[in-house]
Amino acid sequence: MSMSSSARILIAEDDASLVEILKGLLRSLEHRVRSASEANLAAALLGKGRWDLFFCSTKLWHSCLQTQDLLALCRQNQPETPIIMLTGYAEVSLANMALTRGAFASLQKPLKTELTVQTVKAALDSQIKQPLLPLPDFDSESLPEPQPHCSGLIGEHPGMLQLYEQISKAAPTEMSVLLQGESGTGKELVAKALHEHSNRAAGPFVAINCASLPENLLESELFGHVKGAFTGALRNKDGLFLAAHGGTLFLDEIGAIPTSMQLSLLRALQEREIRPVGALQSIPVDVRIISASNEDLQERMAKGLLRDDLYYRLNVFPLRLPPLRERKSDIRLLAGHFVRLHDKSGKPWRISIPALEALINHDWPGNVRELENCLQRACALSEGQCLQLHALPEYLQKARPEKEETRTRPAEPLAAAPDVQMTLRAYLRQCERHFIKLVLDHYAGDKEEAAKSLGISLATLYRKTQD
């Protein structure tokens, strides 16, 4: 099923205003939509006919989990139907639990239109790419064998699908590409994908980490040197620019290049020629530059550590790589990929539900690289082709989505009991102020993050906090 054809979509949600907004959006995309505000009605609808997509309120699902597990019912009756959780504030741990039990993705309330549309498209497309299979039991589940994208990239999260689309557009061009993402997100894999889908694919792909060499060696490594240029230069040496001639040069940790070298790099990019250290003549080179950084390069510019003209020369086509904590729905796919990568038996693998919950509850500061290292260790320690919780590192075994006291504490009211003389508009404004304060407290006063969570602009947040 693709986004271009009409889909039958079921929404289980007790928030009437959210249902109307979601219905309007989905119907504008020419889908047919039914909704249920109660678990019993949703269960009855899941048992009738076929649904192409199921939106389920995290709160509604959890409230009737012991008597009417809507996710399990959907997986049983409609095994190929993707499930998207509608998750409220402070329900993240429940959404993570739903992901371990087969949900395709989770959307945070209030819904953001663009992300919702992307997630719906990815979910409907997944019915063709990777059907969801019913869970055979509640103790463990099979690990999928994912389909790699763009020369080996793994993931079906909307953020990754958007990245694949951007790679396909950038690769055939000669534009310089700047990859920005945290350490371990796979920047070199993306750089290789750009090279392999470019017109330079037959040429060399050469990579260097600019932070790994001191300044005097880095210049020689990039541009080469002539015999006698400095102590120890016993013969002529070609640099990486010449080694990458006709292909792609990947400059990782570009922010680490010293300011004294940045002008030489800028000239090489502008003039498409280099001058080896100690040489009198320049040498023409034909190289495409892909650079990467896990730092805020604009902040480095503001501090005078990076030339503005070099930054804009490198940042012609920027690509952002999402951290793993933003695409936890891909963890099962990545786990399936890595266990097959490190176990050469070719036998199918399973993962216990506690182990999968531990993987999803962790924030992964080391991103995909950290996940791969953990799974490589777990493969060696597991028995019977099933990843168990005890095979994971100890810090993962202890991971919890939130503190126990937070889960058991009753929810705070949105606002104090209203004065019956207060107008409805005034009371809603009071509720809004209270909720904004809760979100700001959650993000320790970070207004930018709070605005993203609330689904409003930073300017709107400033105005509402000053009213």
Image (cartoon, rainbow, N blue to C red):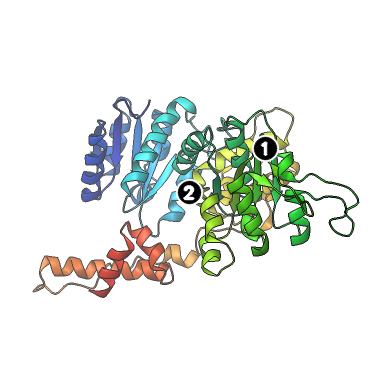
The quadrant where residue 148 appears: top right
The quadrant where residue 215 appears: bottom right
Asked whether 185 or 442 is in front, the reply is 185
Name the residue type under label 2. Met
To which residue does mark 1 refer? 339
Quadrant (top left, top right, bottom left, bottom right) of the C terminus? bottom left
Residue 158: where, in percent of width, then height? 44, 41
For mark 2, give the secondary structure: helix
Few, some or many residues within 10 Å of mark 1 (<14, 14–19, 20+): many
Is 78 situated above or below 249? above
The quadrant where residue 372 appears: top right
Q: Is residue 387 visible?
A: yes
Quadrant (top left, top right, bottom left, bottom right) of the N terminus? top left
Which mark is on residue 373?
Answer: none
Name the residue type under label 1. Val
Which mark is on residue 97?
Answer: 2
